[in-house]
Amino acid sequence: VDPSIDVFLPPLTIQPLIENAVKHGILSQVKGGTVQLRITRQDGSTLFEVRDDGKGMEQEKVQQLLNLRMIDKSGIGLSNTNRRLTQMYGKGLSIHSKLGEGTMVSFVIPDPNKQGNLRAT
């Protein structure tokens, strides 16, 4: 993480992503695994990425999480985070996952100085 990055982040945004990566991706594997958090500047915005090399998810599960349709409570943290980011910034989480290889969840916090980047709440 670049220490010069200074950005407002809504409460409980990163924590559920890390928690889900550990709980659903890593703990179920005998070999363990790793979780990485990467925060970078990108075109004036801030990109957050949480990656794990865990078990991954099927695309149907990814779509359920992104479409805010949860069958059970196993992905409620991701769904809630996605909903909050979408309400605040107009765009939520991006999830890329492959079974047996892991998952990357990312989101962008727009530059607050650019007009139109924050939505009224």
Image (cartoon, grey):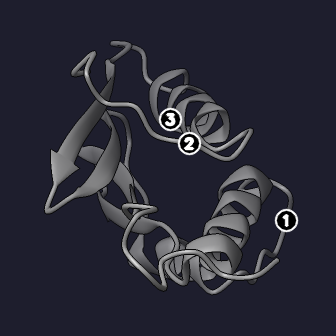
* Amino acid type at image mark 2: Phe
- Judging from the image, what secondary structure is the residue with disc 1 in? loop
The location of residue 93, given as percent across then percent down, is 48, 66
Residue 72 rendering spot, x and y as whole percentages: 85, 65
Residue in the foreground of this view, choosing between 82 and 8: 8
Query: In the rendered structure, which disc, 2 or 1, sits on the residue that comes first in sequence?
Result: 2
| Observer-nearest of 3 and 83 | 3
Measuring from the top left, give residue 47's x and y in whole percent: 29, 51
Q: Amino acid at mark 3?
A: Ala
Direction from residue 114 to residue 116 in the image, left or right: right
Residue hosting label 3: 21
Q: Which-is-in-front pick, marks 2 and 1?
A: 2
Q: Nearer the viewer, mark 2 or mark 3?
A: 2
Does residue 121 sit above or below 112 in this rendering?
Answer: below
Q: Mark 2 or mark 3, which has the lower sequence index?
A: 2
The quarter of the image holding the C terminus is bottom right
Residue at the spot 57% in from the left edge and 37% down from the top edge: 14
Looking at the rendered structure, the kind of residue marked 1 is Asp
Residue under numbered circle 2: 8
Quick check: 46 left or right of 62?
A: left
**The residue tagged with tag 2: helix, strand or loop?**
loop
Q: Position of residue 25 (x, y in %)?
A: 47, 36
- Compare residues 46 and 83 and report the one nearer the observer: 46
Point 32% across, 44% down: residue: 49
Q: Quadrant of residue 85?
A: bottom right
Q: Nearer the viewer, mark 1 or mark 3?
A: 3
Q: Quadrant of the N terminus?
A: top left
Residue drawn at x 48%, y 77% as measured from the top left? 117
Q: Could you tell me which secondary element the residue under label 3 belongs to? A: helix
Taking the spot 37% from the left edge, 73% from the top edge, the residue there is 114
Q: For the image shown, how many numbered marks are present on the structure?
A: 3
The residue to which callout 1 is attached is: 72
